[in-house]
Image (cartoon, grey):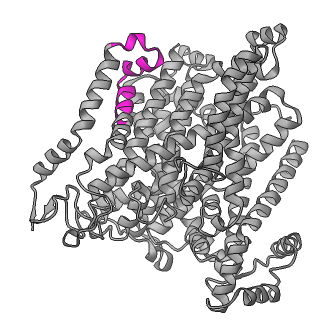
Amino acid sequence: MEVLAPGAIVLAVLGRFLPVWIAMAVIIGASFACRRRLGTYGQIFDSWIGAIGFGLVLFWLLTALMAHWVAPFDPYVQVRALQNKPPGTFTAEAGPYLFGGDALGRDVFSRMVYGSRTVMTIAPLATLFAYMVGITLGLPAGYLGGWLDTLLSFLANLVLAFPVILLFYLLVTPEIRQTAIPGTMAAVLFLFPVAFVTLFLWSRLRDRPDMLWRWLVPVLAVGGFGYLGLTGAWDPTGLLRMEPNTLNIFLAVVFITAPTVFRIVRGLTLDIRTRDYVAAAQTRGEGPWYVMIWEILPNARGPLIVDACLRIGYTTILLGTLGFFGLGVSPESPDWGSTINEGRKLLRVYVHPALPPALAIMSLVLGLNLLADALREQAMKD
Amino acid sequence: MLAFLARRVGVMVLTALCLTLIVFALVNLKPNLVKLAKEQTGSRISEQQVEVWLDQNGFNRPFLVRYGEWLGGVATGDLGHSSRFNAAVAEVLWPRLGLTAKLMFWVMVVMVPGALLLGVLAGMREGSATDRVLSTVAIATTSTPEYVSGVVLTVIFASQMVGLQWFSGSATSAADDGITLTNFALPVLTIAIYGMGYIARMTRASMAEVMTQQYIRTARLKGLGFPAIVLRHALRNALIAPFTVIMLQFPWLLTGVVIVETLFNYRGFGWLLFEGAANNDIDLLLACSIVAVVIVLTTQLISDIGYVYLNPRIRVG
């Protein structure tokens, strides 16, 4: 059994990420060259903070996409000889494990790389769904006001007054999967994206029925298929099936995030509602949903994009929290929170299994937060 | 003011009732009750025996009757029986809550002055090099959740690998033998770091806004030095917004407390919540929830009242 020198480990790790470096160089180089023509996206590169943030996020995104090329080993395979071995250890048959082996003899480096997939799919998707819910409810609450606003705001405050950790313990348990609660929550929450897209098209095209149907029929077909698949009601292809626990986690995260988005959208709507262009649209005789979706929403996009960056970072932290408490996707899964949870038990003796996923979470969230900060600075300048 | 207060308290009580109702419903789901029955009587019982046990112990009565009964118990101070510790919940809960209060006290002592200093220094000269460095530091701390900073700090200061070993990686002894720097530094720092950045950023924004006000210009024109302007004129007005934020941090700190108490094995309220959830201890989990909900709602109320009190320009309506 031999161990690589520290320098050799660093070189090997950098080498494993080679496809990521190449893709990053191409994307950043191309974006930087035409940054003047790319609008808000191009302005990210005007500040160091934005460029670093974008680089970190892009790094993890590409790592998640190319995990099967970056990771040298299967994240689930256990090699007895390499249990708890320090970084760089290899034997004649196996290794080298660049970041060492964990308590079960799995490759810490490969697990970290594959772990990015879980985070990079669930966190942005859950944020997107939370935005659909928050926008669909926040716009009418702010624009129409009245009892609807009072009721929705009360409900949002109710969820926000729940300590996050308590909600997780109550919603992500093995017992709750035997009840109808996750199914009902999925049926309600997944309805919002379909409703939002329908309202989006209907408010614009309702005077032109031929165009409306041309768009609405395919959208409803795809949306309906997705809805039935995700709620688990009917899915012949097996394409959209989510593991019950993944679905549970997804729902819990959407449920916690949506009220915050609701409050932001409602606040922005209250502000924008008083502008002249809204009054102009009202005078033209546009319906309330047209004003909300086509006048108010596009003008609220700046703060919403900034918040979405922060929100994805926060969702990443939430997913890590779930993993840390052993409520992660599955006990075996290489997601970062679960890996930290396993690694922390032996932390005082073996530090290498817990440290890489911890630093991975931190760098991804840092990237998102820096990106949000740069976008906010840009918005203030304009 | 009185009408405002009455309405806020009314909404608060209504919210508390709704929340406890939801929690009560969620911990009393059928699978949880079946699990409890099996734990209490030995796991090899038939479904019929489960039903008999549930009937005997009153778990099959109408939901609202049981909720009312539990609420009545809470009002008279009877929080039920903990199956995990085999003792009255009240006996288990209050000492643990005291331990967590100590932890929170030290977190506040470290976090609040640190965050305010960071924010004021960054915000008093907006756009300067100091500002940019300190703002980036603040962003970095908000990107470091407790389970990350806890792990990193333990590796640096407590593991055998790095070998600094300044502090202990376990806070168990703090509960029994009293708090020392060695056993309490890491848990306190871990929570403080994550909360600090957010408060610092709010303070910075508030400070930067105050520094552009007319009366600051007047103070400068009448010849006051920069430190005097910041300390005597700007600071008081700049600290209103952070006060609200600090109060609203409590619900977030609760998650941190559970993580840190698990990570450093400090047996306080967070650990109790974890144990209650992990062991399907219905009464204990309910009691923990009501404590958590009361803390959250009270801090919201204090933050509302404090905001009005500190800033007389705000109309109460």
Who's the residue at 37% across and 70% down the image?
Answer: A345
Q: Specify whether residue A53 is painted magenta.
A: yes
**Residue B307 coordinates in the image, percent (x, y):** 72, 39
Instruction: Give the tally of numbered discs.
Output: 0
Front residue (pair B227, B21)? B21
Q: Quadrant of residue A162?
A: bottom right
Who's the residue at 54% across and 39% down the image?
Answer: A311
Above or below: residue B177 compared with residue A188: below
Q: Magenta segment, principal secondary structure? A: helix
Compared across the picture, whether B253 is left or right of A65 comes to right
Front residue (pair B298, A157)? A157
Front residue (pair A189, B123)? A189
**Residue B317 coordinates in the image, percent (x, y):** 86, 35
Q: Quadrant of residue A1?
A: bottom left
Q: Quadrant of residue A14?
A: top left
Q: Which residues are magenta?
A: A34-56
Compared across the picture, whether B312 is left or right of B178 comes to right
Above or below: residue A171 compared with residue A273: below
Q: Specify whether residue A208 is painted magenta.
A: no
Q: Work out which residue is located at the far right of the displayed protein and give it.
A: B3
**Residue A152 coordinates in the image, percent (x, y):** 79, 41
**Residue A76 is at least partly visible in this image:** yes
Who's the residue at 60% across and 32% down the image?
Answer: B238
**Residue B196 is at least partly visible in this image:** no
